[in-house]
Image (tube, rainbow, N blue to C red):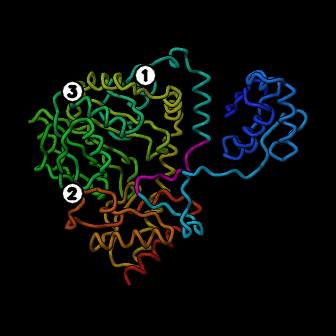
């Protein structure tokens, strides 16, 4: 096996004493970490051929490095890199001394419990998908996605979120942000020049929309969600089921007003249903898309339900937009891995995705209740936002207090964020806007949740004394 391994060395075969040059090149690669401990080296015959050296020269170089402790050699297992310290790259960031003594606890919003990723079920789906995949499915596929996954997603969304669609309306993307970028390009190609987004809302989404050539205008978020009276342009991006970051639900009256606006102005609404499956005080609110499927683009992904690294999303697209979006995907070469699509389709077909959602819903419901109960012991300020998703808001008196708690949390090993610390507002400099900590309670792994909660409550208690 070792005979066929490739190895890159910074080695000049024409230099004098080629054996010593080879030894030096191998030492440098090990010391710099390019050859890691346990890495198997090519056989002496193979490396000699690759480098244009006599085999005896390579054998002697290996023997010298084994004697020095850089390499280990054993019959039947070839020659491998020994466990030796290596010099870290100069660009590597050294941890702050205070951070080395305690593990940082992640409490930012939008991050699921990655330790609960259904690894066994996903691996089983990948194996079944590879065993049954046709040659055509492994070839270049349609830009909108594999038919099997589109059909599975259409059925799942109709069953769980009340979305009105058929498989032809589903477009598979590499997550929501990539899909939003492509959709924005498609809208721009149709003549759309301005889009309204929620205020507060994710700055990353505004950046993506502007990069596509769209002007972004604010929709003020109040107790009933985005204000329809502020809708301008020819499109609007919304999070109706659980507004991010405030956690409110778009009121029925506002839904109907926004749909009426879209119909009157030949505009489109983009429904980002980023965590719609997770509602704890009642059944999840159905997708807004069902009220006007000809005007609403429904979007979801696996970034909150499984893990951001899966890089899978889906857009349910009204017929007038499908051709433009397909063209944008073709131009960008933005297809999604066929293996991932086949595995996701299998996960849905076998019910493993539903089982995982139910399991995480119970876990996150319990965590949110514990968060509310423990904070109630140290502060009179209740959490804001409905009992849903993976985050809740703890209001602050001012942006200055918000920043102060975030900085104090950093010193105590808590990674926190707030309404003013992450550019949620269209005008981040406006200190008059509401301030709050946005507490993501899903990210800590199960074994670290109790410690995270205790440390957070201690921080809040010290701040409010």
Say whether residue 111 is magenta: yes
Residue corresponding to mark 2: 427
**Residue drawn where x is 52% and y is 45% of the image:** 356
Tell me if 141 is positioned left or right of 184 in this view.
Answer: right
Q: Residues within 10 Å of mark 2 (few under 14, many from 20)?
A: few
Q: Quadrant of residue 42?
A: top right
Q: Main secondary structure of the magenta part?
A: loop
Q: Quadrant of residue 424?
A: bottom left
The image shows residue 241, relative to residue 48, as above or below, that is below
Sequence-first disc among 1 and 3: 1
Disc 2, SS? loop
Q: Quadrant of residue 71?
A: top right
Q: Position of residue 355 (x, y in %)?
A: 52, 44
Say whether residue 392 is magenta: no
| Whole-number angstrom distance, CA of label 3 to CA of label 2 | 28 Å
The residue most toward the top is: 136
Q: Residues within 10 Å of mark 3 (few under 14, many from 20)?
A: some
Q: Which residues are magenta?
A: 109-119
Numbered badge on residue 405: none
Residue corresponding to mark 1: 147
Of residue 313 and residue 165, the one placed in the foreground of this image is 313
Quadrant in the picture for the N terminus: top right
Quadrant in the picture for the C terminus: bottom left
Of residue 253 and residue 332, the one placed in the foreground of this image is 332
Disc 1, SS? helix
Q: Residues within 10 Å of mark 1 (few under 14, many from 20)?
A: many
The residue most toward the front is: 16
Sequence-first disc among 1 and 2: 1
The image shows residue 192, relative to residue 374, as above or below, that is above
Numbered badge on residue 189: 3
């Amino acid at each position: 096996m070792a005979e066929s391994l490739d190895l890159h060395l910074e080695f000049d075969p024409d230099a004098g004493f080629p054996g010593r040059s080879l030894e030096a090149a191998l030492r440098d690669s090990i010391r710099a970490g390019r050859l890691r401990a346990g890495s198997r080296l090519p056989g002496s015959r193979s490396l000699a051929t690759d480098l244009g050296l006599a085999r005896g020269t390579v054998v002697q170089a290996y023997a010298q490095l084994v004697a020095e402790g850089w390499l280990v050699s054993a019959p039947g297992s070839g020659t491998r890199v020994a466990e030796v310290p290596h010099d870290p790259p100069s660009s590597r960031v050294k941890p702050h001394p205070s951070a080395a003594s305690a593990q940082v606890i992640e409490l930012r919003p939008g991050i699921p419990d990655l330790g609960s990723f259904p690894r066994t079920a996903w691996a089983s789906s990948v194996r079944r998908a590879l065993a049954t995949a046709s040659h055509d499915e492994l070839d270049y596929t349609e830009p909108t996605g594999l038919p099997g996954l589109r059909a599975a997603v259409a059925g799942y969304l109709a069953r769980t979120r009340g979305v009105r669609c058929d498989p032809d309306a589903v477009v598979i993307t590499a997550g929501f942000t990539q899909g939003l970028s492509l959709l924005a390009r498609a809208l721009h190609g149709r003549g759309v020049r301005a889009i309204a987004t929620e205020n507060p809302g994710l700055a990353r989404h505004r950046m993506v929309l502007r990069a596509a050539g769209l002007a972004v205008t604010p929709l003020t978020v109040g107790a009933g969600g985005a204000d329809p009276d502020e809708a301008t342009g020819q499109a609007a991006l919304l999070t109706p089921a659980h507004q991010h970051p405030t956690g409110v639900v778009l009121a029925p009256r506002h839904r109907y007003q926004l749909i009426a606006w879209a119909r009157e102005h030949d505009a489109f609404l983009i429904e980002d249903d980023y965590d719609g499956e997770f509602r704890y005080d009642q059944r999840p609110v159905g997708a807004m898309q069902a009220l006007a499927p000809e005007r609403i683009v429904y979007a979801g992904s696996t970034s909150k339900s499984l893990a951001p690294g899966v890089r899978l999303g889906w857009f349910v697209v009204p017929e007038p937009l499908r051709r433009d979006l397909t063209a944008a995907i073709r131009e960008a070469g933005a297809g999604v891995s066929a293996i991932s699509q086949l595995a996701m389709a299998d996960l849905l077909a076998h019910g493993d995705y539903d089982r995982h959602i139910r399991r995480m819903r119970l876990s996150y419901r319990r965590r949110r209740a514990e968060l509310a109960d423990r904070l109630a012991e140290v502060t009179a300020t209740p959490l804001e936002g409905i009992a849903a998703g993976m985050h809740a808001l703890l209001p602050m008196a001012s942006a200055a207090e918000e920043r102060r708690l975030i900085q104090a949390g950093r010193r105590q090993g808590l990674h926190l964020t707030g309404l003013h610390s992450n550019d949620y507002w269209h005008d981040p400099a406006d200190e008059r806007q509401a301030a709050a900590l946005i507490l993501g309670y899903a990210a800590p792994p199960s074994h670290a949740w109790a410690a995270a909660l205790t440390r957070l409550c201690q921080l809040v208690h010290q701040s409010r004394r």
